[in-house]
């Protein structure tokens, strides 16, 4: 049984199987900062695991949702009421998406962003040891939301602390508060999620406190995926209808000597050079 640093942490298993079994069957793991991050950024993993009996998506949401934006019918909710609602929405998405397990750690965003606080890294290490996933999705290191970046750093540090033989085969940094269409084409992780639009819509609809509260993430995320599908190649007909771009973080897990900041700087420099080259 995984032990967590915070008493507010919970493990929800939609199909009711024993927790240890639910964790151990995980093949695709999403590690996100906020409720609904997984459904938008790690949707490839959710879609790949939806239906097959030999693939299971596991989710980790690190923060408690208390600071979520709210307006309209939700404007009067206290932080505690908002946190309870967001937890319930995340559980509903886990049911709708057929997740194998959904873990909510209940940290405050300020705790996640405190690099001197090792609790999140330790929690993630314990989860990773229990799950041993093949693929991990987390936030990308060029995201403009500081809590997203902090979660990505914690995930990388937790992954690096694992014995090499149980590290995942691939780690992908996903789009959130910044698109990744700027990445050089040969460095993009291209995730074609065409054909899963109905599932995506059902998952988005679970988060009414955000969509109904003034943030149309459902429209924005679907629009971004459609834009990627069309604008990814100026010379060929569309090959897909919905595409998510990712940043390959696997080299950072295979080689702990690589500096994550320098790794992203290299991508940005290659983008700069590509832009200058296109200008002749």
Image (cartoon, rainbow, N blue to C red):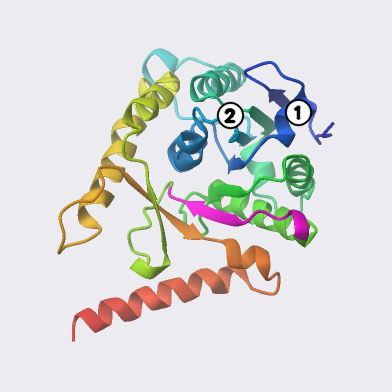
Q: Gap in Å between the C-alphas at discs 2 and 1?
A: 14 Å
Q: Are marks 2 and 1 in contact (CB under 8 Å)?
A: no
> Tag 1's secondary structure?
helix
Residue depicted at 44% across the width and 55% down the height: 246
Can residue 24 be seen from the camera position used here?
Answer: yes
Residue that badge 2 annotates: 53
Question: Which segment did they paint magenta?
Answer: 165-175
Q: Quadrant of the C terminus?
A: bottom left
Looking at the picture, tell me which residue is in the foreground, 212 or 93. Answer: 93
Examine the image and state in which quarter residue 188 appears: bottom left
In x, y percent, where is residue 74? 44, 16
Looking at the picture, tell me which residue is in the foreground, 150 or 17. Answer: 17
Instruction: Examine the structure image and report whether residue 264 is included in the region drawn in magenta.
Output: no
Q: In this picture, is 271 found above or below 167?
A: below
Examine the image and state in which quarter residue 220 appears: top left
Q: In this picture, is 246 found above or below 14?
A: below
Looking at the picture, tell me which residue is in the foreground, 40 or 131. Answer: 131
Residue that badge 1 annotates: 21
Q: Earlier in the sequence, mark 2 or mark 1?
A: 1
In x, y percent, where is residue 14? 62, 18
Horizontal side of 214 relative to 176 (left or right) equals left
Crowding near pointer 1: few (<14 within 10 Å), some, many (20+)?
some
In x, y percent, where is residue 6? 79, 32
Looking at the picture, tell me which residue is in the foreground, 202 or 120. Answer: 202
In x, y percent, where is residue 72? 36, 17
Crowding near pointer 2: few (<14 within 10 Å), some, many (20+)?
few
Residue depicted at 56% across the width and 53% down the height: 149
Residue depicted at 51% across the width and 16% down the height: 77
């Amino acid at each position: 049984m995984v032990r967590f640093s915070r008493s507010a942490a919970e493990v929800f298993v939609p199909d009711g199987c024993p927790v240890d079994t639910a964790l151990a069957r995980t093949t695709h793991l999403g590690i996100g900062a906020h409720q609904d991050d997984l459904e938008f950024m790690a949707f490839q993993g959710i879609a790949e695991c939806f239906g097959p009996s030999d693939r299971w998506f596991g989710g980790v949401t690190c923060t408690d949702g208390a600071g979520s934006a709210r307006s309209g019918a939700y404007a009067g909710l206290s932080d505690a009421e908002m946190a309870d609602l967001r937890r319930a929405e995340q559980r509903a998405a886990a049911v709708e998406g057929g997740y194998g397990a959904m873990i909510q750690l209940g940290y405050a965003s300020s705790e996640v962003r405190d690099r001197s606080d090792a609790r999140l890294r330790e929690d993630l290490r314990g989860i990773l040891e229990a799950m041993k996933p093949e693929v991990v999705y987390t936030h990308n290191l060029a995201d403009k939301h500081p809590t997203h970046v902090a979660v990505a750093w914690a995930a990388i540090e937790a992954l690096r602390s694992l014995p090499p033989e149980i590290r995942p085969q691939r780690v992908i940094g996903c789009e959130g508060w910044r698109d990744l269409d700027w990445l050089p084409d040969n460095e993009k992780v291209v995730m074609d999620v065409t054909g899963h639009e109905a599932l995506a819509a059902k998952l988005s609809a679970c988060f009414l406190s955000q969509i109904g509260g003034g943030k149309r993430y459902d429209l924005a995320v679907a629009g971004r995926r459609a834009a990627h599908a069309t604008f990814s190649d100026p010379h060929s007909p569309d090959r897909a209808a919905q595409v998510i771009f990712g940043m390959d973080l696997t080299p950072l897990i295979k080689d702990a000597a690589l500096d994550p900041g320098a790794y992203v700087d290299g991508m940005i420099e290659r983008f700069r050079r590509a832009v200058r080259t296109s200008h002749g």
